[in-house]
Every structure is written in structure tokens, then in C-alpha cells.
Image: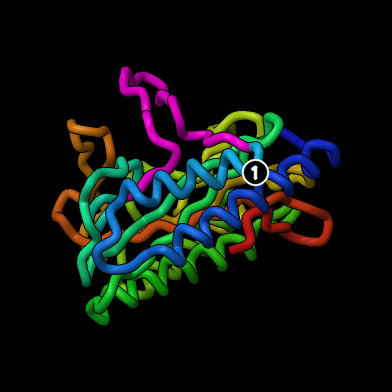
């Protein structure tokens, strides 16, 4: 567990503000016909204007030889995470996941949201609504002296109660001076179990949910992950810090 001091938290608040501003600008740009690379260009421009950089650009996952060469991730439909921006133009009925991290003076925050494009089916609207609600419920449990299991249980219970599936094998994480720090923040668990939460812990909580299977496959072309059965997926993420007064959201979209 890594505990941040007030100086660190001030830096993370600025990083989170920059991330939130850019993420909301990207969300506002979503419409039929927009090409995924246009989101990449907007994020690149806004990062430069803010004096920040992307935590994703040139990132290499542990054990992988793949160097990520974009500022943001754009994952469409069955793609859950790590989709690369391409020349694909959004179509009505698509589901777009926008995910990225910001580095500001060494301080890193991470956040994601999912947007429906044009007209989508009622079950897709339910998927997005349930996933965002699961994030909110997980954050509510991120209180001093609660546990990681409390967060995971709140997310899992809400998702499964609504007949949907938690994506297996992908988790939230600690964040702050590195993009991925300890601890892993699972989207399932048991109340009262796991690491006890302490003031100053900074966590990226991120439920990833499928309308079908919980199982995923890794795509060889870009190392993104998709649902094994091709079902729609959703992903919402916020960076928070544990305080004496409850969770403080550092990326408050």
C-alpha cells in the first residue's frame, strides 16, 4: 500500500482536473461519423495546452513487447479496453469506451467512460447505466477502515443483480506516481475481506462489464481485450483518494 501526503494530493488534483476537462471534451465530440483518430488528435492538442502528457503513450505492459503508441484508448463495442485509435468512423448503435491517463509534474491519474453512439438498443442503455452505477457504489465503499472486498462486493452485487457479467481478469489498481501501482482493485469480493483502506491511498476503481460472457480474449493486432462471445461491454473509471471524510474523487466527470 502507498500512502500519499498532502503535497502529492495537490499534484494529483491538478492532474485529475486536466484529465476530466479533456475526457468531457472527448465525450462531447462523440457522434455518428466521427473517426477514432479525431479523438486522439483532440486529446494530444489539449494535453499540450495544459502542459501535461499522456500516461498511456509509449506504455508497455509487464511481460509484453508491445509499445502503446497513442495518447488515449478507444475501444468499440465488444472491445473492453486498450483499443487503439484507428480510421474507423463511428456508426449508430456503437458503444465507445474512452480511457486515458494524465501525467502532470509526475502525478498520474486515470479515468474512463463509455458513450452510446446514436440510437442503441434498450439492453445497451441498461449495460451503460448499470456499469456507471456500479462505479458509484464501489466508490461509496472506498472509506477509511473499509476493505477492498467491500468495494468489489458492491460492484459485483449490483452488476449481477442486473443480469450482467463482471469481466474476468481485468482490475482496477493503485495509481499516483506510476500508472499501475499496488494494490489491485478487484470488481468482485466479499464484505470485510482484503486489504484495509487507509487515509491517503489513491485508487483507480474501474468496473468493466459485459452483457454476455465474463470471459475475454486478447486481440493479436493491438493487444486490446474483447469479450469472447462478441457481446457488448462497458467501462467506467475514476481515480479517488481515501480521506477521513470519505472518498474524494480526483477525476469528477
Residue drawn at point x = 22 percent, y = 78 percent: 121
Whether the magenta-drawn stretch holds residue 36 is answered as: no
Span of residues in magenta: 52-74
Q: How many numbered tags mark residues here?
A: 1
Instruction: Give the position of the N terminus as an image quadrant.
Output: top right
* Above-or-below relation of 103 to 245: above
In the structure shown, which secondary structural element does the residue marked by tag 1 occupy?
Answer: helix
Q: Quadrant of residue 73?
A: top left
Task: Say if residue 189 shows up in the picture.
Answer: no
Q: Is residue 63 magenta?
A: yes
Front one among 235 and 97 = 97
**Quadrant occupied by the C terminus:** bottom right
Residue 117: x and y, percent?
A: 30, 69
User: Which residue has dot 1 on it?
Assistant: 50
Q: Position of residue 70 (x, y in %)?
A: 39, 35
The residue drawn where x is 21% and y is 71% is 92
Indicate the position of residue 31 as horizontal and vertical percent values.
32, 68
Q: Residue at x 61, y 54 (%)?
A: 192
Looking at the picture, tell me which residue is in the foreground, 145 or 202: 202
61 up-or-down from 24: above or below: above
Q: What type of secondary structure mainly makes up the magenta span?
A: loop
Residue 194 x, y percent position in the rendering:
58, 44
Height in image: 32 above or below 182?
below
- When asked about the image quadrant of residue 89, the answer is bottom left
Q: How is the image coloured?
A: rainbow
Name the residue rendered at 31%, 44% in the picture: 85
From the viewer's perspective, tell me whether residue 127 is left or right of residue 10: left
Amino acid at each position: 500500500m502507498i500512502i500519499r501526503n498532502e503535497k502529492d494530493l495537490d499534484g494529483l488534483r491538478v492532474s485529475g482536473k486536466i484529465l476530466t476537462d479533456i475526457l468531457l471534451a472527448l465525450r462531447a465530440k462523440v457522434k455518428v461519423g466521427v473517426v477514432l483518430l479525431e479523438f486522439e488528435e483532440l486529446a494530444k492538442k489539449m494535453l499540450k495546452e495544459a502542459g501535461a502528457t499522456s500516461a498511456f503513450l509509449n506504455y508497455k505492459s509487464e511481460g509484453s513487447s508491445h509499445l502503446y503508441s497513442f495518447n488515449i484508448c478507444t475501444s468499440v463495442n465488444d472491445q473492453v479496453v486498450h483499443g487503439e485509435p484507428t480510421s474507423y468512423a463511428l456508426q449508430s448503435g456503437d458503444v465507445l469506451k474512452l480511457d486515458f491517463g494524465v501525467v502532470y509534474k509526475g502525478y498520474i491519474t486515470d479515468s474512463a467512460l463509455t458513450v452510446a453512439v446514436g440510437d442503441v438498443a434498450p439492453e445497451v442503455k441498461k449495460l451503460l447505466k448499470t456499469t456507471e452505477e456500479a462505479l458509484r457504489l464501489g466508490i461509496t465503499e472506498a472509506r477509511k477502515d473499509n476493505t477492498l472486498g467491500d468495494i468489489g462486493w458492491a460492484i459485483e452485487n449490483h452488476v449481477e443483480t442486473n443480469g450482467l457479467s463482471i469481466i474476468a481478469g481485468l482490475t482496477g489498481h493503485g495509481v499516483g506516481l506510476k500508472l499501475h501501482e499496488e494494490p489491485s482493485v478487484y470488481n468482485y469480493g466479499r464484505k470485510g475481506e482484503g486489504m484495509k483502506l487507509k487515509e491517503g491511498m489513491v485508487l483507480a476503481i474501474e468496473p468493466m462489464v459485459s452483457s454476455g460472457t465474463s470471459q475475454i480474449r486478447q486481440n493479436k493486432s493491438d493487444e486490446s481485450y474483447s469479450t469472447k462471445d462478441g457481446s457488448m461491454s462497458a467501462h467506467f473509471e475514476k481515480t479517488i483518494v481515501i480521506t477521513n471524510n470519505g472518498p474524494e474523487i480526483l477525476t469528477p466527470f
